[in-house]
Amino acid sequence: MQIEEKDVVDRLQAYLDHHISLSQLVNWAERAMMDGAFVGENREKVRDIVARLGVADVFAFGLSWEDFEQALTALRYGTEVRIFCVSGLN
């Protein structure tokens, strides 16, 4: 399995959009560290970010919003937060 920055960004976005759980994100990262080949000009950054994601299920290492921002910034992506009412009540 080849891992490049787009794969990491897609996984982070899926997690932040609640399409995958933290355990799914961690499992993907663990598999990528064991079986993946990091490719592309940012492969070292990608590997470091994936390694960090692989321990995110350990309480001492959890993930903060700043961790996501730093990871995405390192891959030349930005973040934006939208707040909206989900219950229909204002």
Image (spheres, rainbow, N blue to C red):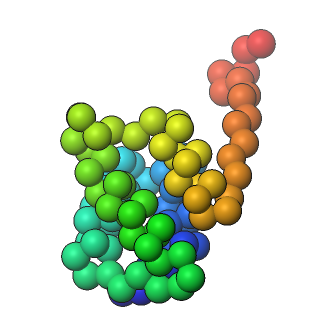
Please state if 38 lies on the left or on the right of 27 as rendered: right
Q: Which x, y percent locates residue 50?
A: 38, 63
Q: Which x, y percent locates residue 84?
A: 73, 28
Q: Residue at x 33, y 38 (%)?
A: 62
Q: Residue at x 48, y 43 (%)?
A: 67
Q: Which x, y percent locates residue 20?
A: 43, 54
**Residue lying farthest right?**
90
Please state if 37 lies on the left or on the right of 59 as rendered: right
Residue 24 in sight? no
Q: Residue at x 32, y 74 (%)?
A: 32
Quadrant in which the C terminus appears: top right
> Across the whole image, how many numbered discs are drawn on residues?
0
Q: Residue at x 72, y 42 (%)?
A: 80
Please state if 82 lies on the left or on the right of 72 as rendered: right
Quadrant in which the N terminus appears: bottom left
Q: Quadrant of residue 35?
A: bottom left
Q: Which x, y percent locates residue 15?
A: 48, 51
Vertical side of 36 occupied by 14: above or below: above
Vertical side of 56 occupied by 36: above or below: below
Front-lying residue, 69 or 44 = 44
Vertical side of 75 occupied by 7: above or below: below
